[in-house]
Image (spheres, rainbow, N blue to C red):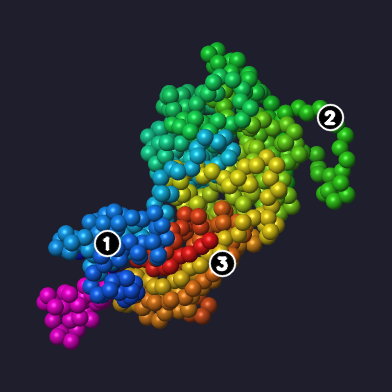
Amino acid sequence: MQLGFDYIHVKYVFKKTTEQRKIRTINIEDFIAIYRTLAHRNEIQELFFSYSPNHKILTEVNLLEFLKKEQFETEATEATASELIMKYEPIEEVKKLNQMTFEGFLRYMCSIDCAIFKHEHRTVYQDMSYPLCDYFISSSHNTYLISDQLIGPSHLWGYSSALLKGCRCLEIDCWDGPQNEPIVYHGHTLTSKITFASVIQVVEKYAFVASDYPIVLSLENHCSPKQQEVMADYLEKILGDKLLTTTIDETVPTELPSPEALKFKILIKNKKVGTLQDTILRRGLDTHGEVVEFEEEVDQSEDEEAAESKPTPKTPQPKRKTVEKKSSSPPRKKPKVKKIKLALELSDLVIYTKSEKFVSFENQRANQHCYENNSIGELKARKLVKQSANEFVLHTARFIARIYPKGTRTNSSNYNPQEFWNVGCQMVALNFQTPGQQMDLQNAKFVDNGGCGYLLKPEFLRDHYSKFNPHSVIGNQNPTTLSIKLISGYQLPPSNLSRSNKADPIVQIEIHGVPEDQVKQQTCVVRNNALCPRWNETFTFTIQVPELALVRFCVEDQISLVSNEFLGQYTLPLLSMNKGYRHVPLYSKLGDRLDPASLFVYIWYY
């Protein structure tokens, strides 16, 4: 019948239809009754009747009027209406007359053509020729872990799964292994170990399945120089031409290349000895066995994040007097320093993504090169967002910043990525293995632009002289008024407490964005109805920074006045929302589509 049905709901309606006769078989009249109970939704029938003069068929002209008035398809023509009739009308005789019955209208309203997510955003539509630092980049933390951070398994599935979701920045924790074979695991824990070579083989296999755009391998390198050379050898031999080993035109860049220019390339993010100029001059020379030793400062201000810190060589700076502001914190203790040995072979594979220690915004602005980036722990980054948000925006307009979870998140929980996207951080790394609201936001943000893993940042986060501050947006941006009429639900997942197909559904609509836009509203409860609950409630939001806003629909079963059970959710960028009558697909906590469960809404914004 070309319509999706949930077995639990079909079973319940079947039972209701046959319970009076006490037999477990049905005739054709029963079948029609069951079909109509499940498929003939009153809210869609009401819509059909309002555009069908005889309440039986829609002509091409009637359908075109609906498309223009209700679906905001201003460029639709009679040819558009005719195509939809050909595509969705199931009755051949009616189709030949270029008309549509309610059955055809129902199929159209439940189709991808009436999905809430804009069809044109399902492919790459953004300009991909800006420098890398001008994009949000889908990023994973401790990609090899598929459970917790202490005793859970390390698995190659972590890499293949992240890559198939469009992730473009993967993390690899490298340690010395037996038989001169580098291994990957969460150091100083009981997590299991996998070989570095097998990780690179998986990366090579799945690298460009979901996206053509460049991958960054963020190396957490704890290996001896000898095994670093083994790593470099594996990277070159397994990845071959996919590995970026020099600048595009063999000159030192003044700005980063674009995702377009780096298509099908894999970049190495790691510490690096010296400058990019030195690497270019060494090209073609045999550096096997060459090791450089240097000192690095251990950041003691974030002990709980130390497990993830990525300190880099200390660049000697000329001594200069600094005037301390009255508000500055007391002088810190003398920093600890440790010696690091880096194999030149591995160092020279780092081209556009050299890891540089973050000291301060002022220091980075004065000394950092465009091809250098910073990894900043969640706690320190949050403090910077709170105290110097505009400076953070100016920093990320020039350089790539990677944010990673604090080390105390041993259960692989995630922080809210939105607060760091708000200041333009490109690589906001999350534990992809941990479902929840944070990963819902991640998946929603990066489903845009064809799911390619790169999103062009709004102009105010790319401007080197931007005055944008996420904490002070009223009067400085172009706000959008969003109206959502939540009409109904359809075949929602029943409650775990129900023996039939019942639930007491409630829907929360959340806006995630800059602090001023963070808001949540909810419907009333519909009792004992997961099959076709009706709300007909309208919610209005004023959104100050629509470019950064995500809209999340969360459906819950109200168990008690203080407790709800999650049933399903869907999240998407505000600017990827279609206007008009739309259906909202629902997804499970693990991110699986709960077909045919959906919400029926009317969207309008300006």
> Which residue lies under the disc numbered 2?
319
Q: Residue at 39% of width from left, 77% of height from top?
A: 534
Label 1 is placed on what type of residue? Glu
Label 2 is placed on what type of residue? Lys
Q: Residues within 10 Å of mark 3 (few under 14, many from 20)?
A: some
Of 324 and 106, nearer the camera is 106
Can residue 474 be seen at all in this image of the molecule? yes
Residue 515: percent from left, percent from top: 64, 60
Image side of residue 602 versus residue 455, left or right? left
For marks 2 and 3, give the one nearer the viewer. Answer: 3
> Label for residue 419?
none
Q: Which residues are magenta?
A: 12-40
Image side of residue 265 versus residue 64, left or right? right
Residue 492: percent from left, percent from top: 36, 70
Q: Is residue 230 above or below residue 337?
A: above
Q: Is residue 467 above or below residue 291?
A: below
Report the Cα–Cα distance between label 2 and label 1. 78 Å
> Which residue lies under the disc numbered 3?
541
- Is residue 32 in the magenta section? yes
